Image (cartoon, rainbow, N blue to C red):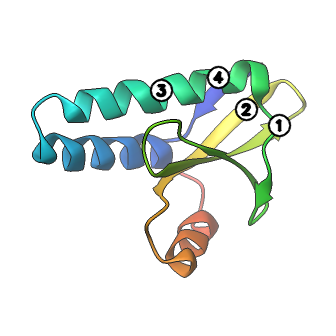
Amino acid sequence: MKIQILISAVKDLEEGRIFYEKQGVGLGDYFFDTLFSDIDSLALFGGIHRKIYGYHRLLSSRFPYAIYYKIENEKIVTVWRVLDCRKDPKKIEKALWKKKS
């Protein structure tokens, strides 16, 4: 499957990278690399994850983040958001209902 990452997900990744870089030098890059590795795994494993709020949810292997995605035409994985799991579930749900960007 091909992977498409929406601007909203890229913004989420950048915010996470900035946050972790403030925690320690190089940690932001490690965060970014880890999350992209998780996203890359969707090319093989897209669609096997539990659905939450109408999206498949892949939990990151190393960070408390979830990747929310949908499968289109059984050929394209569209990553909508990459959200911090430590947030209030109502805020996560609200973030997922925002208009596609």
Disc 3/disc 2 C-alpha distance (Å): 14 Å
Compared to residue 46, the image places residue 96 above or below, namely: below
Q: Secondary structure at mark 1?
A: loop
Quadrant in which residue 33 is drawn: top left
Compared to residue 5, the image places residue 98 above or below, namely: below
Which of the two discs, 1 and 3, labels the residue nearer the N terminus?
3
Quadrant in which residue 71 is drawn: top right
Do the numbered discs 3 and 4 sit on residues whose CB atoms are within 8 Å?
A: no
**Few, some or many C-alpha atoms within 10 Å of disc 1 (few <14, some 14-19, many ≥20)?**
some
Disc 2/disc 1 C-alpha distance (Å): 8 Å
Q: Secondary structure at mark 4?
A: loop
Q: Which residue is mark 3?
A: 36
**Few, some or many C-alpha atoms within 10 Å of disc 4 (few <14, some 14-19, many ≥20)?**
few
Which of the two discs, 2 and 1, labels the residue nearer the N terminus?
1
Do the numbered discs 2 and 1 sit on residues whose CB atoms are within 8 Å?
A: yes
Disc 1/disc 3 C-alpha distance (Å): 17 Å
**Few, some or many C-alpha atoms within 10 Å of disc 2 (few <14, some 14-19, many ≥20)?**
many
Q: Secondary structure at mark 3?
A: helix
Which of the two discs, 3 and 4, labels the residue nearer the N terminus?
3
Residue type at mark 4 is: Ser
